[in-house]
Amino acid sequence: MTSPTISTSNPIKSRSISEKRLESIFRSLTLIFAVGIGVILLLIGLVVAFDSIPAIEASGLGFLVGTEWDPVKNVYGALPVIAGTLISALLSLLIAVPLGLGTAIFLSEDFIPLNVRTVFVFLVELLAAIPSVVYGLWGIFVLIPLLKPLGVWLNANFGWFPLFSSVPVGPGMFPAGVILGVMILPIITAIARDSLATLPPELRQASFGLGATRWETIFRVLVPAAFSGIVGGIMLALGRAMGETMAVTMIIGNSHRLSASILDPANTIASLLANQFAEASGMQVSALMYAGLVLMVLTLVVNIFAELIVNKVKAKYS
């Protein structure tokens, strides 16, 4: 009895000329799109930098440390708005990062049934769809009255500390930081959840096999493994917080003065541009563009710093 002969030949079908041409076109298009992003960013930076040249020549680096903003006298100092931008963004991160990371862990692990978890995911994502002006209105009519008694209590009991050294009057840095924290919460939660959910299941199994508890697995294995994605989400949220305009403008108080207390009214670069650009002329336009250039540089520095942190952590856990 003879056994059937099995053919081992598996000829690979060669691609036709039209397929090769289509692939070449696709590669060219993706290259054009990738280069186009860089070109658009470069053009935006060049336009802002070019329009800010008169203010740079008039004020120089003194613009960064000056505290007076008087268009009548053509005196412009951006230190209060730079400080307001950084403080409000950092305050929002202090609120949103623990909540966002905790929510991401809760939604990525099997703490609750899948159908209930789906509802929570939908609610978190729904926060990102709410317009900024609605957040601002909610901040005016709900958040500010709700936080004012807390601010009064902080001033009465911890007024010796510079951060709480003033009596809240309503709008201020504190409610602005809280509203920003709520606005960036879905960004941090969604990206951190995706980073944790896409980890290979072998990591969990190996950790459990070595005798680690569930919480040890989460905080000593899963979170470090997803750290680059988590930091990316935090930096994206930080950029949103630094550039947010409408909601912050409505509740921060728009006061151009430097104060150590987060209970005082303050201002940000984005709010300054929103309030003054429509009616600005002459040197004031250039000063506002200079402030916008400073905001772009701050965002760039933040992203470079985040990249350094991610690379350092990758080198540690690789």
Image (spheres, grey):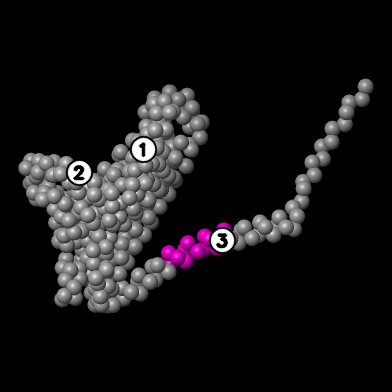
Nearest-to-viewer mark from 1 and 3: 1
Earlier along the polypeptide chain: callout 3 or callout 2? 3
Query: Is residue 218 rendered magenta in the image?
Result: no
Residue type at tag 1: Leu
**Residue holding disc 3:** 31
Label 2 CA crowd tier, 10 Å (few <14, some 14–19, many 20+): few
How far across and down, in percent of the image, does residue 302 sit? 34, 55
Residue in the picture at 30% in, 55% down: 244
Label 1 CA crowd tier, 10 Å (few <14, some 14–19, many 20+): few
Residue 261 makes an appearance in the image: no
Residue in the picture at 79% in, 41% down: 10
The main secondary structure of the magenta stretch is helix
Nearest-to-viewer mark from 3 and 2: 2
Circles 1 and 3 in contact, beta carbons < 8 Å: no
Find the magenta span and give its range: 30-42
Earlier along the polypeptide chain: callout 1 or callout 3? 3
Label 1 SS = helix
Real-space CA distance between mark 2 and mark 1, rounded to the nearest whole angstrom? 20 Å
How far across and down, in percent of the image, does residue 109 sit? 41, 30
**Residue holding disc 1:** 123
Residue in the picture at 46% in, 29% down: 204
Q: Nearer the viewer, residue 159 or 32?
A: 32
Mark on residue 142? 2
How far across and down, in percent of the image, does residue 141 sit? 19, 46
